[in-house]
Amino acid sequence: MTVPAVPRASRRAGAGTLSAVGRFYVTTPIYYVNDAPHVGHAYATVNADAMARWHRLAGDEVFFLTGTDEHGAKVAEAAEEHGVTPQEWADRVVRRFQDAWTVLDISNDDFIRTSEPRHRVTVQELLGRIHDNGYIRLDTYRGLYCVSCEDYYTEDQLVDGKCPVHGRPVVEMEEDNYFFELSKFEDRLLAWYDEHPEAVQPVTKRNEALAFIKGGLKDISITRTSLSWGVPVPWDAGHVFYVWYDALVNYLTGIGYGVDEARWTGWWPHVHHLIGKEILRFHCVWWPAMCMAAGIDPPKEVHVHGWLLVGGQKLSKTLVRDADGPVRLTEIAPQALTEDFGVDATRYHLLRDVPLGSDGEFTYEGMVTRYNADLANNLGNLLARVATVVGSKCGGTGPAPDPGSPLRAAAEEAVAGAVAAWERWAPHEALAHTWSLIGAANAELEANEPWKKDPGPEVDRVLGSALEALRIVALLVTPAMPRTATEIWRRIGLDGSPEERRVPADVAWGGYPGGVPVEKGAPLFPRRKD
Ligand code: MSP
């Protein structure tokens, strides 16, 4: 497939030059419905959401897809344990994911469930194409299977005879399976990665994918007869596709592959998958090979993130009521954090604390410390101080910014740093750059102490510039903390919402109009004592 790419926005040429709209298609992995959503899932989804929101703010046309992976032995087992059908079980658990994403202000444009009829259509279309192209053959498969991984292992991959990931016993399986001839794609995959160095990020993960391919690829079994909970194989009744094969195709279902040619060809060249590190092999080896076998380009970019890990005992006491013994990350519901810290503080922590690509320790104490330092003391304090002094010295009307303010350079630097960081999928750095402007604005207020001075042009200049810094900060934090951004915008007297603005066009110094009412309001992030 050769589809001409819609040009990227020309925003990189500088402010005010948004002439063409780019496209950005971002996906999360689809989550298994065998269990409830936890903070690890929230980490991935909030990061994808922030990237989607960043691209909307930058003027791109965005399609953001998330959803649930509902087929396979793992879900069938969970349903059986609860005495319901797999569909009933999926219908029950999917709501928990949808509720969690609503609470976290996730702005997905679509939610794909793999048990939906539209997914069956796309899977059968894509795999039918691969079959017609001669890359699928029938054979007998014997192996050791871990139901939790939905994957086979060889004897020497086991640890004490058990699954190396879950420590669960594996089962011996023998099936007549259809095989995808992955072995035929070694050279093509290496050539693709050679020509597209950005296709897997970060580079350490690209190297992992390359090492895997260079280690030699075996054909893989893609159907099951031992299970009926799956997408039926169109050319052989009695077989269903192996859950991973059906799952990966969700990225094409969401854009209408097999149904709406113009739609899917318009989005596919702009796809960016965000995935966790343990599913790299599926996304960076199998999936691109499947795409090639079907005659379409592999995904443009796969971004691989690490894991959130959990330590501290305090976490268990505070976040999981009635916890018995140490708590695992998978037991922390995203809502436990949003109820305790608020939605935006939770989003901020997930984006700011663990750089995409690395593993990171998640602790309750760390979250409190960062909340107090960054949100209560820095951002919240800046807004409260400025609004208070505008009230006492300017009669509650915000003055215009000073074109020669020393904050101007700090703002320009923060904008350039944040824009570049969002562009390279580094939300934690984008936020660090944004906070450098907050720090500079607080320091400028300290240096001038407008609260000690008589009302007049000097006080107006200092406060107008602090308000301008807040306006720019509101725009830059929009992808991470949309509610906070809107609230700052409103309190400093601006019309509309920051989401309607464009970055960098609207972050040039001097955009705060002055002469508008500034409201003090309650603290945005009250300091925590725990
Ligand atoms: N259903 C498959 C994905 C299919 S995509 C075509 C799956 N589901 S999952 O629910 O087990 O995991 C989904 C994602 O959540 C993975 O990318 C995984 O890395 C991520 N996380 C699960 N626990 C996590 C942490 N503790 N930390 C960060 N992300 C984690 O795999």
Image (cartoon, rainbow, N blue to C red):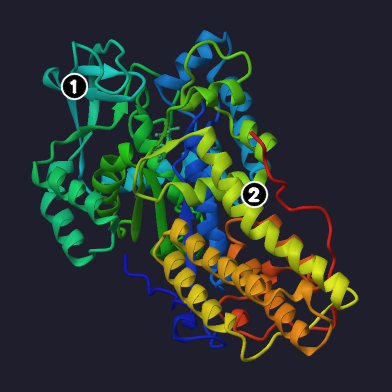
Going 20% across and 44% down the picture, which residue do you hit? 135
Query: Is residue 287 among the parts visible in the rendering?
Result: yes
* Rendered-image quadrant of the N terminus: bottom left
**Left or right of 192, for residue 344:** right
Which residue matches tag 1? 141
Residue type for callout 1 = Tyr
Q: In this view, does 373 lie above or below 81?
A: below
Residue found at x 45% / y 81%: 12
Mark 2 lies on residue: 344
Q: Position of residue 20 (x, y in %)?
A: 52, 82
Closer to us: 141 or 59: 59
Q: What residue type is labelled 2?
A: Asp
| Along the line of sight, the residue nearer the viewer: 308 or 314 | 314
Query: Could you say which is closer to the camera, residue 202 or residue 242?
Result: 202
Q: Residues within 10 Å of mark 1 (few under 14, many from 20)?
A: some
Look at the numbered disc 1 and say if its residue's Cβ is closer than 8 Å to ligand 1: no
State which quadrant residue 458 falls in: bottom right
- Give the CA separation, mark 2 to mark 1: 49 Å
Ligand 1 visible in quadrant: top left
Residue 115 visible in image: no
The reply, left or right, for residue 18 in relation to residue 261 is right
Q: Is mark 1 on a helix, strand or loop?
A: strand
Looking at marks 2 and 1 on the same chain, the residue that comes earlier in the sequence is marked by: 1
Question: Image quarter for residue 423?
Answer: bottom left
Q: Residue furthest front?
A: 452
Residue 510 percent coordinates (x, y): 66, 86
- SS for callout 2: helix
